């Protein structure tokens, strides 16, 4: 009889097993059977803890994105002290793109899960959280007042989330012929024009964020571990 783990240990084992296979094989090629055998568990417990493969994949990607933000925390602290929220947002966006594009394993995983039905809702939820957190903390840059209207914000979030997902898929699949950094500049310019009325402010911060991100080195090691270094 299999020696099934129990409780939190079981959930952690299943999660880490899924992370291992999603990294090494990709989401599409990984089976639930592989995950539960590696974790010395069973399909019933997998469904109990995670509902399904899509759910755990979204959780793993969310953790990966959170790790990027955390890795930047100390580097961006001086900007935070100056209240440069817009620049922080743009540097974090660039870091997000850089980390996804850091290796073939991450590119494959992103290509797989960005096609899932729940992925756009994840991206929209990030936008909702960070934008409204900015209002709560007190925005340091001029922002479109209509964003305070939840109905308007939801429309903008849906539009820009869809744009982000498809545009970045096209970038990493090399379907867009323009240089990578120029493509990111274009995305940030279009994304923030819905949020910030001052076009000059947007362009200035696009330039600053490109320069700042260019001084950083992004590494994603085995199983989605994120590290960010300042170049010498």
Image (cartoon, helix red, strand yellow):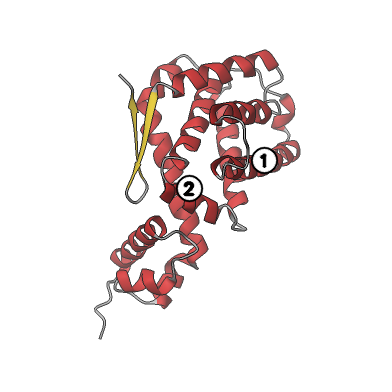
Closest to the observer, 128 or 63: 63
| Quadrant (top left, top right, bottom left, bottom right) of the C terminus | top left
Considering the numbered disc 2 on the image, is that residue within a helix, a strand or a loop? Answer: helix
Determine whether, in the image, residue 64 is placed left or right of residue 12. Answer: right
Q: Check the image and report above or below for 49 versus 65.
A: below
Chain-order first, disc 2 or disc 1:
2
Closest to the observer, 136 or 102: 102
Q: Check the image and report above or below for 102 versus 116.
A: above
What residue appears at the point 61 percent right and 31 percent down from the top-left corner? 178
Residue 206: x and y, percent? 57, 20
Q: Check the image and report above or below for 159 versus 2.
A: above
Considering the numbered disc 1 on the image, is that residue within a helix, a strand or a loop? Answer: helix
Residue 231: x and y, percent? 33, 22
Q: Residues within 10 Å of mark 2 (few under 14, many from 20)?
A: some
What residue appears at the point 60 percent right and 33 percent down from the top-left corner? 132
Disc nearest the viewer among 2 and 1? 2
Q: Which residue is mark 1?
A: 163
The number of numbered badges drawn on the structure is: 2
Q: Which residue is mark 2?
A: 107
């Amino acid at each position: 009889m299999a020696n099934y783990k129990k409780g939190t240990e079981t959930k952690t084992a299943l999660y880490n097993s899924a992370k291992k296979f999603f990294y090494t094989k990709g989401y599409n090629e990984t089976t639930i059977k592989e995950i539960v055998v590696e974790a010395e568990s069973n399909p019933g417990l997998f469904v109990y803890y995670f509902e399904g493969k899509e759910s755990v994949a979204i959780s793993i990607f969310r953790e990966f994105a959170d790790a990027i933000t955390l890795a930047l925390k100390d580097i961006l602290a001086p900007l935070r002290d100056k209240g440069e929220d817009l620049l922080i947002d743009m540097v974090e966006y660039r870091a997000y793109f850089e980390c996804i594009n850091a290796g073939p394993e991450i590119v494959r995983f992103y290509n797989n899960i960005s096609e899932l039905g729940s992925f756009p809702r994840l991206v929209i939820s990030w936008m909702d959280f960070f934008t409204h957190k900015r209002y709560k903390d007190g925005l340091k840059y001029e922002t479109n007042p209509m964003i305070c209207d939840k109905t308007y914000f939801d429309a903008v979030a849906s539009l820009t989330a869809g744009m982000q997902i498809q545009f970045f898929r096209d970038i990493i699949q090399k379907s867009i012929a323009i240089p990578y950094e120029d493509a990111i500049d274009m995305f940030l310019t279009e994304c923030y024009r819905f949020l910030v009325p001052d076009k000059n402010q947007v362009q200035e911060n696009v330039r600053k964020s490109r320069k700042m991100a260019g001084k950083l080195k992004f590494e994603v090691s085995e199983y989605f571990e994120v590290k960010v270094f300042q170049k010498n």
